[in-house]
Amino acid sequence: MSETKQSDNFFQKRWLPLLFFILGLALLWIGNQEYQQFQSEIGDYVTARPDNRTIWLLILGAAATVGGAIGLVRGRAI
């Protein structure tokens, strides 16, 4: 029975950082896909700057991934 309590305690403490980590990785992946799409169409643009959406996806993805990783390492919710 103590194994069940330990595993329940693990998921109660770490589900939020794990969610942030997974969400951050997904945002980074989507942002990277948009950035690569932008680079392939760069000849059509006058300025060589990605969209604001791409920048925000990369920033928020990095922040969520780092926050989730720190939460998982520390063993408690952010």
Image: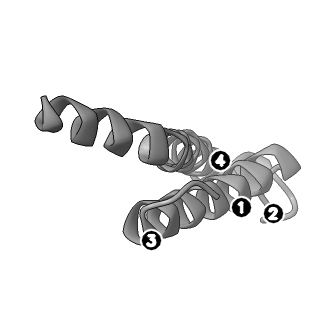
The mark closer to the camera, 1 or 4, is 1
- Badge 3 marks a residue whose secondary structure is helix
Identify the mark nearer the N-term, 4 or 3: 4
Q: Position of residue 50 (x, y in %)?
A: 77, 56
**Given the image, on which type of amino acid does mark 3 rest?**
Arg
Whether residue 72 is visible to the viewer of this picture, yes or no, is yes
Find residue 38 and name its label: 4
**Given the image, on which type of amino acid does mark 2 rest?**
Arg
Find residue 74 and name its label: 3
Q: Which residue is mark 1?
A: 59
Q: Nearer the viewer, residue 18 or 4?
A: 4
Q: Position of residue 66 (x, y in %)?
A: 54, 67
What is the C-alpha distance between the residues marked 4 and 2? 9 Å
Identify the mark nearer the N-term, 3 or 1: 1
Q: Which residue is mark 2?
A: 49
Identify the residue shown where x is 24% and y is 42%. 6
Q: Nearer the viewer, residue 55 or 10?
A: 10
Q: Quadrant of residue 58?
A: bottom right
